[in-house]
Every structure is written in structure tokens, then in C-alpha cells.
Image (cartoon, helix red, strand yellow):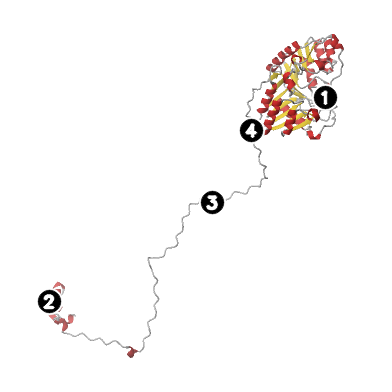
Amino acid sequence: MTDNIPMGIRYLKGPVFALLLAALPLTVFAQRALPELPPMPTPGDMGQLPPPPAVPAPPQITGGPVPAPAIPLQPAQPPQVPPAAPQPLQPAQPPSAPAPQASTIPVAAIPSFAFSVSADVEALLASAVYSCRETADVAVYGFTLPRVAAALLDAHKRGVKVRVISNETHALGTKVSEELRALMDGGVEVRTLRGAGSYGIMHNKLGVYDGKLVSAGSFNWALTADGANHENIVFIRDESAVDGYVRYFDWMWRFTRAPSEGPGPNYSQDHFGPPPEDRSRPVYFNGAMLPGYSFSPSGRTEADIITAARFARRSIKAAVFSFYSSSIGEALVEARKRGVEVEVVTDRVQASQSDMTSYLAENGVKFRWSRGQDGRGVMHHKYAVFDGKLLMTGSFNWSVNAQANNFENMYYTAAPEYVSAFSGHFDEVFGAALVPTAEEMASFSAQPPQEEE
């Protein structure tokens, strides 16, 4: 375009040039014609042109790169702990039995001892059973106490393990009491036991409660014992003595039979072997060492009674239901000859059948007999107090049968609370008892009964 600008103006630059250029007429630029462009070829001149190659359409982009599918957030995982080592397989355990329940029956306070003439012994025995939480083991000669039967059934229903040993003849045939039958029908485990020989019996009157408390003494578990007889009962808490009674009960249990098996055979005296024994002999009496307990059959009870009599220095007070042992009788007479005051009271009927009655009376022993409370029952004690220092009491009658054939027990203690009370009670019983007349003495026949109570 600058070729048509006059020479003088061509070299002007800057803003001046722009002003001059704007003032020039358009004719200045139109003086020189522009060259013509050659015409566009036609299809006839160049032939048919091929179509241009197809160009693929570019990908459609609608907003940047396509995002990957969203991955849901996972909660934080705790650190992985390596698996524990496999444990050895344990044998399948049987379902555990429900724990025994405590009784809801109010119980009476249980003393150290009681006498039937002044206490409701049945209530005390029932309370001992109601207090049980685990076990109640009972070995009784006869059983006719309804309140104690109810307590044993209650204990069984509460889950307490109850075991009852009955003298064989009281659990078979027509002699089964309603109370013992109720225990059998109620699911309580009742078994029978007889002693050795033709006359041996299971003569104990004891209970073991939770392995912590023992009841023993002369008290038969019968209504007549509470209301008519002279009886005693001791409640033992000394651990060593209780352990001895526990072992004795388990020892007896080994020889028991189910009532359905019927009567047992006539056992020899060596069939059972020696019963448990207190080898520690912890009771000290005037230089003699005596046991805390002794048992039959074939134990040392008779020998221990004789030892106590030989070591006595001042007095012997014996209240014994039946007295047939000549060995013990001779020991008492020897003590009397040494100057020891010896007093003996026995049951009226039993005394009339023993030759010990006249032997003792003829040798200076103060002898009397009794018919129980107010003459309505029996004098059923089996205890002795020596020098006001030693007490021995239990089910053990002073007889050969008790020593050699029967299941019996004897408890020994020097505890003043026991000794003093039993000594005082003896004075009451002996004071109310009768002295046999000469005619009565002459009528005695030495025929011991087949069974002792």
C-alpha cells in the first residue's frame, strides 16, 4: 500500500504520518490497479477430484477426565492379632447340679448339750438339719420323729445330699415307721445295716451336719425319748472329733444295703475290721491319755472305760441303760475298794436281767434303778463322769454286745461346761431313782435281752 504514497511523505513515521495518511483522499490509493487473480478451476478442467479422506471425530470431552468409580470408605480395622495356639480338646462336662438352697424355716439356737427332761430335743435336731447347706448324714437305731423327718425331706428337696443309715430290723418288714417310710418314698437315700453275730445291731443315734457339727449321745430319734425317757444329747463342734465321726459314718456306709436287698447275712465279728480310731488321744485324765471318740464294733471303748475307772481318785458317777460287762463291773469294784465313791443308776427292766446288779450292790457300790421321767419311760442314758473332770457319753451300753457286735459310738471330753452339767444331771436322776429291795434282788434272772436300746 505504501507504493502509491508520494515520496516526501513515504518516509514520515510516527503520529505525523498517521495524520497525513488519514487526510489523503482515497484516490491516491486507487491510482494503481490490483492484479487479477486467476480464475478457480472447474471440474471439467481438472477432472473429478477425490473426496478428502475421512477424519475421525475427536473424542467428546465434557468436563475433563472421567473420574474412577467411588470407593466407599471402610471403618478403621484393629491390628491383626495372630491366632492363639489351638487348645487341647476337653471332655464334655455334665451339666452342673443346682447349688443347694438355704432353708427358709427359722431354726433354734443349738446348744452344746441338752437333756430330754428339760429340752425339746426333737426341735434341736430339726434345727440342725434345717441349717444344712451341703450334707446331712444320719445313723439311727429307730426313727419316729415327724419334725425331723420333715426337715430331712426339706433338705433333700433343697439339694442337700442326705444319707440315712437305719438299723436293719427297723427298715424292713412291719417295723418300718411312717417317718422312715416317708423318707424312702420322698427319694432320700436310706440304707440298712446290721451288726455282727446273731444279736448285732446298728445302735448309733448320731447326725453329721455339713461335716461341721455332730449330734450324739443316748437320745433315740423317737417320740418316747423326748417325752418319757431320761436321755442326753451332745452337739460336737471340735474339728478333730467331727472329722472322726465323718470317717466313721463313711466307714459304716461301706457295709450298708438297700432295703430292697432284704436282710443281710449273719456276719462274723472280724467281717468289718477295726473302725476309725483317734490315735492322738488328746483327752488327759489323771495321767491317762484317752481319745476324743471311739467306735464299735471291735473298737477300744470298753478298754477306755476301764482305764478311766482305774485312774479315778475321788468319784465315779455312771448312768447306763444296760450294764452287763463283767470287766467294767470289776473295774468299778476295784475303784470302790481304793476308796473311790462309786454310784451307778441303770434302767429298772434292764437291771432285773443282769447279774451285775447284785454284784455291784454286794461290793459296796451305791446302786439304784430308774423308770425314766416320772416312771413313764426308761432310764436310757449311757454316760459316766469321773472325778468331776471327765465325761464320756454316747450310744455305748456297758455290755459285751456293744463292744463286740454293735455299731456304737462314745464321745470323751474334759471341757468343764459338759462335765459340770452332766454331773449335776446325774445327781438329779440318781436322787429320784430307787434302791432295789432284797426281794427284788432275789428275783433277778441273768438273761440279757436280744436287742438293746
Q: In the structure shown, which secondary structural element does the residue marked by tag 2 occupy?
A: helix
Q: Earlier in the sequence, mark 2 or mark 4?
A: 2
Residue that badge 2 annotates = 23
* Quadrant that contains the N terminus: bottom left
Q: Earlier in the sequence, mark 4 or mark 3?
A: 3
Amino acid carrying label 1: it is Ala
Distance (Cα) linking label 2 and label 1: 167 Å
From this view, report whether residue 259 is shown above or below residue 403: below
Q: In the structure shown, which secondary structural element does the residue marked by tag 1 occupy?
A: helix
In the image, which is nearer the foreground, mark 2 or mark 4?
Answer: 4
Using the rendered view, name the quadrant where residue 392 is placed.
top right
| Label ID, residue 404 | 1
Q: Earlier in the sequence, mark 1 or mark 4?
A: 4
Amino acid carrying label 3: it is Gln
Residue that badge 4 annotates = 101
Is 284 displayed left or right of 270 in the figure? left
Using the rendered view, name the quadrant where residue 294 is placed.
top right
